[in-house]
Amino acid sequence: MTRYIASRLISAAGVIVLVSILVFAIIRLIPGDPVSLLLGENLTDEARTHLIEKWGLDQPVVVQYLRWAAGMISGDFGTSLSTQESVSSLLLDRLPATFSLAIFALIIGVVIGIPAGMIAAYRANTMVDGIAMVSALVGLCIPSFWLALMLILLFSIKLHWLPVSGYVSPFTSVTEWFTHILMPSIALGAGLAASISRMTRSAMLDVLNQDYIRTARAKGLSERVTLVTHTLKNALLPIITVIGLQLGFLLGGAVVVEEVFAVPGVGRLLIYGIGNRDYPLIQGVVMIFAISFIVINLVVDLLYSILDPRIRFQ
Amino acid sequence: MFEPTISLADAAEVSPAADSWSDRISNQIRFWLRNRLALVGLLIIVLVILAAVFAPLIAPYDPYERDVRNRIAAPSSAHLLGTDELGRDILSRIIYGARVSLMVGGISVGLATLIGAPLGLIAGFNSRRLDSLIMRVMDALLSFPEIVLAIAILAILGPSAANAMIAIGIVYIPIFARTIRAPAMVESHREYVEAARASGATNRRILFRHIAPNTLSILIVRITISLSYAILAEAALSFLGLSASPPTPTWGRMLKDGQSFMQQAPWVAIFPGLAIAITVLGFNLLGDGLRDALDPRTRK
């Protein structure tokens, strides 16, 4: 197991290095002078020369990359051109909102998706199955930002149950946090619930046809035990694959949903960065998204090996 | 580039491939009748394409024409889906918006196919070193959430519809490379490849004349499903103001504009969203149907 974990860690580190090269290249690929892009254009010659020397922008590109990467490892993502604040502190301020949104959306996706898929598989080819799968297909086709607007229309404008936009930290008020995060999470989690329910149904159907399920039923186990302990447990691997893959999409989807609900998260920071041509900020946000995605995939891979020991011996 | 040796109907059939044209046509009819959801998907897509192509003939109004006396007018016989904040007819803008969605979706997926599929073929067919090099770069690209990578690319290129096509295309390249690599790897160990090699065929010929056609069915399914995601991605980028600039009608931008008028005129946002959902549903239904029909495990 230790060897497997070590090999996956090395592989993830390799991907992070490749990703960091791509992110570092962003500014070098933009037409124009990368120094001006990094430092801004409203600087005196003296300040410009000072910053070029301080940040090593007169050094070869490889040295610049190594300095940038070393800074990143120590938590220094540079300085935002538009706010003059440290990108790391901007990220740290915004990450809790994005993560709480993504985690809550994940919970909604799992809580709706797995039971819906289980019921659909158990009642396969009945009306219940049909309704569940049509709902899942619709859930996959609806853009999260449109669903977000429809939720606002219903729950905020018509019923006045939930606030239209904004975000409150759970450390300030748990109730306020919940009411503010509920609609964005539903908008983001609906597509995930749809994917999970489709995969759960398919994986459960595969397992339900196995001989050991017939044996479990024949020896008198209750349907609940047969479904949850014997069927779901063995169908979990592909379900976790889908959850792992979709978590990346959740992070991406958060960019748009944060914009609709004015959630002050990392995604909104990215849009702000693009609007202000703030390249150090864009680099920092993109890198954080990529690292989060890689870490999620790593955790999913390690979960596989716990669920299915055959994987770590391959 | 590819030389198809199988048609969809042939691939869906268990019986040997038909020889005559009448057999081929009856096979196609049987294929579509057997896959009714795929047929529904195909009909939706055909309707959307027809609407986009014949937009000037179908649209009741000029999509750019402002009518200040009719701002945010509710749906009526004059304006079936109402008007927006500038008095422009929403139905006409949705019909014209289909052009941008289909063009960005189609060209970006085309770009991803033209670059990603050959990369996957080469990776699956060649030495471990080249395979490893190509796939590590693809893994790095896959390490970004799709929309974040597209936004990062647009940060380099600048926001526009043309650049959105390039950005979405680059995002999908690794997906196509991965999809094609696995079947290319399997096919490259088959006997017919050995036979081609023994008869003196070059690697290039083996790859593009013999192996590529046998990955075509998988490629078709991937293209269909990717089109639905590409249309969603374009709508998201438009919504964020990173695709075609105003006043060009795009479904995502129309939704964004409608957000400000949700209380007074919800239809401004409702109908463009429905247009996106129905189009995506069409591609998903077709993709699901084709996948079920072409997958030997689910083929009946």
Image (spheres, helix red, strand yellow):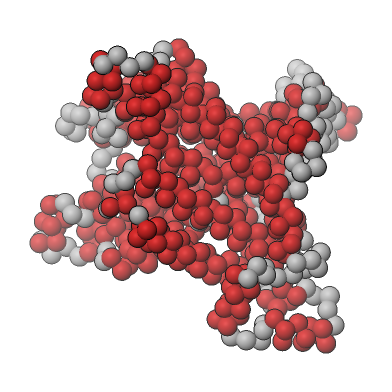
**Looking at this view, is B229 or B207 the one in front?**
B229
Residue at image point 22% right, 27% down:
B23
- Give the residue at x 74% y 23%: A154
Picture coordinates of residue B211 (x, y %)? 24, 52
| B261 sits left or right of B35 in the view | right
How many marks can you see? Answer: 0
Residue drawn at 51 percent across, 64 percent down: A16
B284 shown above or below A50: above
Asked whether residue B50 appears in the rendered view, the answer is no
Residue A225 is left or right of residue A90, and the answer is left
Q: Is residue B34 visible?
A: yes
Task: State the residue in front, A215 or B280.
Answer: A215
Q: Quadrant of residue B26?
A: top left
**Spot occupied by residue A122 in the image (x, y as percentages of width and height):** 39, 18
Given residues A45 and A78, the one toward you in this image is A78
Position of B19 compared to A112: left or right?
A: left
Rendered residue at 76%/48% (across/down): A264
Q: Is residue A1 above or below residue A303?
A: below
Q: Is residue A149 above or below residue B125?
A: above
- In this view, which residue lies farthest toward the right? B69
Q: Residue furthest top?
A: A127
Quarter the N terminus of chain A occupies: bottom left
Residue B293: x and y in percent read 32, 30
How far from the left and from the top, in percent, is residue A52? 72, 84
Q: Quadrant of residue B259?
A: top right
Position of B28 with respect to B170 (left or right) is: left
Along the viewing direction, whichever of B138 and B53 lies nearer the viewer: B138
